[in-house]
Amino acid sequence: MKFRKYEFNSKEEYENLKIQTNVSSFDGTFVELGNLRENKYSVDVLWNQSYPEEFIPYEIWDIEGNGSHTFLGWEFGQEWWYL
């Protein structure tokens, strides 16, 4: 599993990327946080497995700690793979 944070220019851009890459709730847990920074649409995702490369350009890393949201028991950027 991987905990990642993303910023998009709009909610529509995020929704279009989800459709384009065919991701769903089976791929991870998606939390839409809305416009938090610089009028960007923020989304946190706890991916179950690997994730589409198309999401990589939207990843953000300049967050202090966990930012405004975290998943219970997870630290931002944490990765854990199970067999």
Image (cartoon, rainbow, N blue to C red):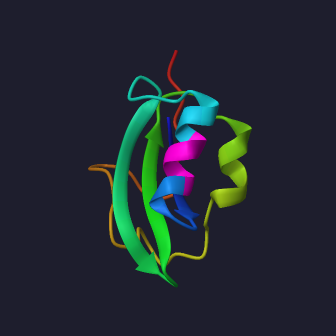
Residue at 47%, 67% in the rendered image: 41
Give coordinates of residue 55: x percent, y percent. Answer: 65, 47
65, above or below 5, in the image: below
Residue 3 visible? The answer is no
Where residue 45 appears, x then y in whole percent?
45, 47
10 on left or right of 52: left
**Does the magenta stretch mainly form a helix, a strand or a loop?**
helix
* Numbered label tally: 0
Q: Quadrant of residue 35?
A: bottom left
Query: Extreme bottom residue here?
Result: 38
The answer to which of 51 and 73 lies nearer the viewer is: 51
Compared across the picture, whether 23 is left or right of 33 comes to right
Q: Is residue 59 magenta?
A: no
Which residue is at a point 52% across and 15% down the rendered structure image?
83
Task: Determine the residue positioned at 45% across, 65% down.
Answer: 42
Nearest the viewer among 9 and 4 is 9
Based on the displayed image, in which of its 4 quarters is residue 61 positioned? bottom right
Residue 23, position as x, y percentages in the image: 52, 30
Instruction: Locate residue 33 relative to residue 43 in the image: left or right.
Output: left
Compared to 50, does 63 lie above or below? below
Residue at the limit of the structure toward the top, as seen here: 83
Residue 70 in sight? yes
Q: Is residue 50 above or below residue 38?
A: above
Instruction: Inspect the magenta stretch and tell me whether residue 15 lies in it.
Output: yes
Percent across and percent down for residue 33 are 34, 63
Give 39 or 26, whichever is nearer the viewer: 39
Magenta region, residue range = 13-17
